[in-house]
Image (tube, rainbow, N blue to C red):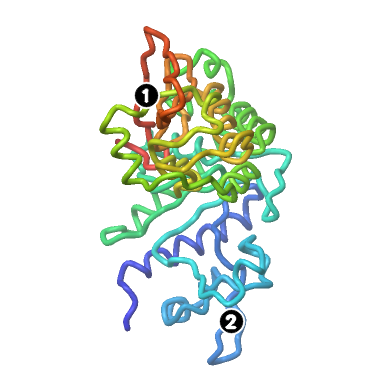
Amino acid sequence: MKPLRSVKPSFPLNARFANKRANQPGFFDVLQPAEVHDKATGKQYSFEEAPLELLNQGPECWELSAGDSWHGFHDEDLVDTNSMLDPVKVTITCPGINLDGSYQEQGIPGYLITKFLDDKRIEIARTGDYTILILFSVGITKGKWGTLIENLLTFKKLYDSDALAVDAIASLKGQSPHYDNLTLKQLCQQMHEKMCELDLMNHINEAVNTDPEPVMTPAAAYQKVLRYKAEHIRLDDFSGRIAASMLVPYPPGIPVLMPGERLPVGDKGIMGYLRALQDFDKHFPGFEHEIQGINVDENGDFWVRAIIEDERKAVKRPEQLRFKRRVSPTIKKGRQ
């Protein structure tokens, strides 16, 4: 089976990133192996110097193998699996976190990069805490990915030169008075330190490893909603309740709670992660996370929909409750 034509354009971008990283310490990186092996000739190449034919002929150069240190995955997660990178997707990593999940002293969160690139009309597919995902689909040219690299270089220059954040990212103007007098570097560092304080990476792991109690099927929960047996409640009141809607925070971009599942009383996994995201979103207007199933009121508090159980009275809501955001804006996908 021949590989897609759209695979090849991503290879030069990967190589350019490796060269820029070598010449500019602290520059952005790409999630890829440092070296690849040609089984036919026995030669070892650095990724940026590997022949395109080698990268394009099979999956070996893209595999995530147990024992390799470049990808950061635990060995037990990769043993007896066929895991590999998608050659048409490039994950750009930002300074701020190590492969073992520990935080670095300084960082540049991916949310700021996406905001900057969005102002330049460069489309980002997905944004994580310290990653951005680029898709190489049909129509992506050398000129387009060259523009991406030049804009990342521009961001780094603005960062190093202490340019004002609102000058570097024009769309920040009017978002919050707090941004007006901050340099881009200061805003990056404040956001990075907040993410360290909240320990978002650890909260993600705990959230996806939480085991909610399945009380009813999603279909049965939906029937409850149709019969007005559901209510909006504050996040702080959600512990021990049955979800009426699917909760999908990004990252990780997978459901952490399905309709009909009861959140354990005293849960610190899902609740801990959602509280951390709520705290972050309140501190950084304009950088709110994408969370399916969450509504946000005018104070920035999270509200979720829960099933009204027969033995439980409905929670009394404030009379003037208004949601400023019913569907979270997606800073992950760039422009709407």
The label number, if any, that marks residue 325 in the structure image? 1
Left or right: residue 86 compared with residue 213: left
Q: Residue at x 55, y 33 (%)?
A: 240
Q: Are marks 2 and 1 in contact (CB under 8 Å)?
A: no
Q: Position of residue 239 (x, y in %)?
A: 56, 31
Q: Characterize the local packing of mark 2: few (<14), some (14-19) or many (20 or more) Cα atoms within 10 angstroms.
A: some
Q: Residue at x 58, y 20 (%)?
A: 182
Q: Nearer the viewer, mark 2 or mark 1?
A: 1
Q: Residue at x 62, y 37 (%)?
A: 267
Left or right: residue 336 compared with residue 77: left
Q: Position of residue 281 (x, y in %)?
A: 52, 26
Q: Characterize the local packing of mark 1: few (<14), some (14-19) or many (20 or more) Cα atoms within 10 angstroms.
A: some
The label number, if any, that marks residue 272 in the structure image? none
Q: Position of residue 121 (x, y in %)?
A: 33, 39
Quarter of the figure that contains the N terminus = bottom left
Q: Given the image, on which type of amino acid does mark 2 rest?
A: His
